[in-house]
Amino acid sequence: MSKEFLTEDSRQKTRQLISDAACELFAEHGIDGVSTRMIAEKAGIALGGIHYHFKNKEALYLEVLRRALDSGNALTIDDLLAEKSHLLETVGGKQEAIRRIVEDFYRRCFDGRKDWRKKVMLRELWQSSPSPFLEENILKDWDRSIRFFKMLSPEGSDEDAFIWSYLPDALAAFQSLGKDLLERRFGQEYCERLRKRLVRQTVRMMIAFLDLPMPDNLK
């Protein structure tokens, strides 16, 4: 079918097929280990379809990074304060804010439909020169977390703010690295229990870091 007879809906579906295939392949093999032909074959389209929708492989890889970094539905402290404007004025409110944001973070991290996301980001971060696009967006995420820390602990140091904000990312990355091995060794059910414990322990660490009293349900 010629391009002029393609509907907008069919264009979008084809673009999505290409993007989905690229996400999985780049996650498994990295940008250097993937060709546009491999992506076209996995997507089930003609090779020319890749170049119709994307200028080159690098442009497609940038699209994958954008998707990997997409946190459009992430819960933020501003969302919580929009619900309860005085949330951070009590110890219990601070505890609740930490718990809800950590739970939301891990919910998005451990979404099985996005396992490729973690692999793409870890692969890229291991590079000696990660993508400036990735660095810029990760720094934005850290800035949001550091701002949250400063709202909870205005007198806290910048170094403590960075360490505190990095805790969930570091633990999630460590769990992601061992996910396949753990599931093979102990089974999926065990790993699911482990993830729930990880959420709980992360909340405990972040509360303790701030010298806040530990809620009874986390003791």
Image (cartoon, helix red, strand yellow):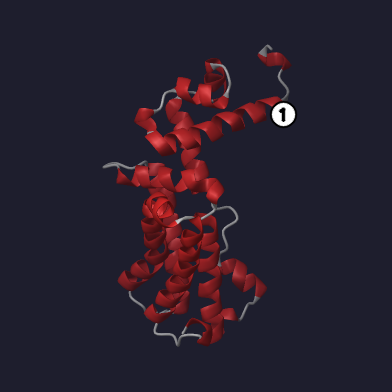
Most extreme residue toward the top, as rendered?
A: 2
Is 158 situated above or below 26?
below
Label 1 neighbour load within 10 Å: few <14, some 14-19, many 20+: few
Residue type at mark 1 is Asp
Residue at figure coordinates x 46%, y 69% from the top left: 197
Q: Position of residue 171 (x, y in %)?
A: 38, 62
Q: Position of residue 187 (x, y in %)?
A: 46, 55
Q: Position of residue 54 (x, y in %)?
A: 52, 25
Most extreme residue toward the left, as rendered?
A: 128
| In the image: residue 108, left or right of residue 157 | right
- Residue under numbered circle 1: 9
Residue at figure coordinates x 37%, y 53% from the top left: 178
Is 110 situated above or below 22?
below
| Residue 146, picture quadrant | bottom left
| Residue 25, picture quadrant | top left
Q: How many marks?
A: 1
Tell me the SS state at disc 1: helix
Residue at figure coordinates x 71%, y 19% from the top left: 6
Is 122 situated above or below 33?
below
Q: Nearer the viewer, residue 86 or 103?
A: 103
Q: Position of residue 160 (x, y in %)?
A: 33, 73
Q: Is residue 17 visible?
A: yes
